[in-house]
């Protein structure tokens, strides 16, 4: 019994001595510890290329509102003139339609080539199919829905067809008795013959011709040096006397009024004004 007790005592003593030699050391590291950032796949953001509206692509440019319901800047119109000047001259020589009139109509009707009919059908004058047309055509909403309009392979065909359209119809006969250099008479004659229903159509054509000096193209064909006289704008006692080429829009800009204000001041219901008419231009 005593022997067993001694054995246990010696065992405990040995364990105690051995355990006193065990040292715990704290492990150190020179490497700094950083928080782990959980990474997620990056989102793909589509890049959208923003295209500025056509009418604002050149600051300060004059904007032409065409009958084709598009807008064209001064730069657009000048490029159009450069592109089709020779075509208009050739048609004047062959058919007798003043190049200035053809160009002005093309600019106005096609929005300097940016109108839908011009882009999709090379139709720069809004010529409808009419009876007997055997060529290609497109449908387009105009006076009525989905009307038939002529389609051409090339804009030059549209120019040629415009000239033959005028020369082949009896109602335009009186035009060809006019001086080929008198673009004012031609512009008014087109309206009188029923080419357009817009009461301001002649003044719009004349305005384009004089603004872009299209009469110089006629000069080249006719061998002359005609220059139109500056138009006298008369204002008396707060009233403007309407001159050739004036529109409510141009007068609103001139006198810093809105078109609606001009119409209200003068009790005008539509947009029609006539040469010699006196308009109040002051509130």
Image: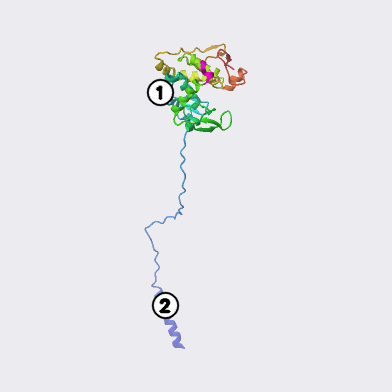
Query: On the picture, is 7 further left or further right than 258?
Result: left
Spot occupied by residue 251 in the image (x, y as percentages of width and height): 54, 18
Residue at x-position 43% and y-position 20%? 94
| Distance of label 1 from label 2 (alpha carbons) | 117 Å
Way the structure is coloured: rainbow
Residue 148 visible within the image:
yes
Residue 248, horizontal then vertical, whole percent:
55, 20
Secondary structure category for the residue under label 1? helix
Where's residue 128, x and y in %?
53, 28
Viewed as shown, does residue 35 lie left or right of 268?
A: left
Determine if the magenta segment contains residue 110. Answer: no
Residue indicated by mark 1? 86
Secondary element at tag 2: helix
**Looking at the image, can residue 254 be seen?**
no
Res 196 quadrant in image = top right
The quadrant in which residue 85 appears is top left
Specify the farthest residue to the left. Answer: 30
Seen in the picture, residue 237 relative to 45 is either above or below; the reply is above
Q: Do the residues under discs 1 and 2 have CB atoms within 8 angstroms?
A: no
Does label 1 or label 2 sit earlier along the sequence? 2
Q: Which residue is disc 2 drawn over?
A: 15
Please report the bounds of the magenta region as a residue range: 169-174
Q: Quadrant of the C terminus?
A: top right
- Residue 143 lies, in percent from the top left, at 58, 28
């Amino acid at each position: 019994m005593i022997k067993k007790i001694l054995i246990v005592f010696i065992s405990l003593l040995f364990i105690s001595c051995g355990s006193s030699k065990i040292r715990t050391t704290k492990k150190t590291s020179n490497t700094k510890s950083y928080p782990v950032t959980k990474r997620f796949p990056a989102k793909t953001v589509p890049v959208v290329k923003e295209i500025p509206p056509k009418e604002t692509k050149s600051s300060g440019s004059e904007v032409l509102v065409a009958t084709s319901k598009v807008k064209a800047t001064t730069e657009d119109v000048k490029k159009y003139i450069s592109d089709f000047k020779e075509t208009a001259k050739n048609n004047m020589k062959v058919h007798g339609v003043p190049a200035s009139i053809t160009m002005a109509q093309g600019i106005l009707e096609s929005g300097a080539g940016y109108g839908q009919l011009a882009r999709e059908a090379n139709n720069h004058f809004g010529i409808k199919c009419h009876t007997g047309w055997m060529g290609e055509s497109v449908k387009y909403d105009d006076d009525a829905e989905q009307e038939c309009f002529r389609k051409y392979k090339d804009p030059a065909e549209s120019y040629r067809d415009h000239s033959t359209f005028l020369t082949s119809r009896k109602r335009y006969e009186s035009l060809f008795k006019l001086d080929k250099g008198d673009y004012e008479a031609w512009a008014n004659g087109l309206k009188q013959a029923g080419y357009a229903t817009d009461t301001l159509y002649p003044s719009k054509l004349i305005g384009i011709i004089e603004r872009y000096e299209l009469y110089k193209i006629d000069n080249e064909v006719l061998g002359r040096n005609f220059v139109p006289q500056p138009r006298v704008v008369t204002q008396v006692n707060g009233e403007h006397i309407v001159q050739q080429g004036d529109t409510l829009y141009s007068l609103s800009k001139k006198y810093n009024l809105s078109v609606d204000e001009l119409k209200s001041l003068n009790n005008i219901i539509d947009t029609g004004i006539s040469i010699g008419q006196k308009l109040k231009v002051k509130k």
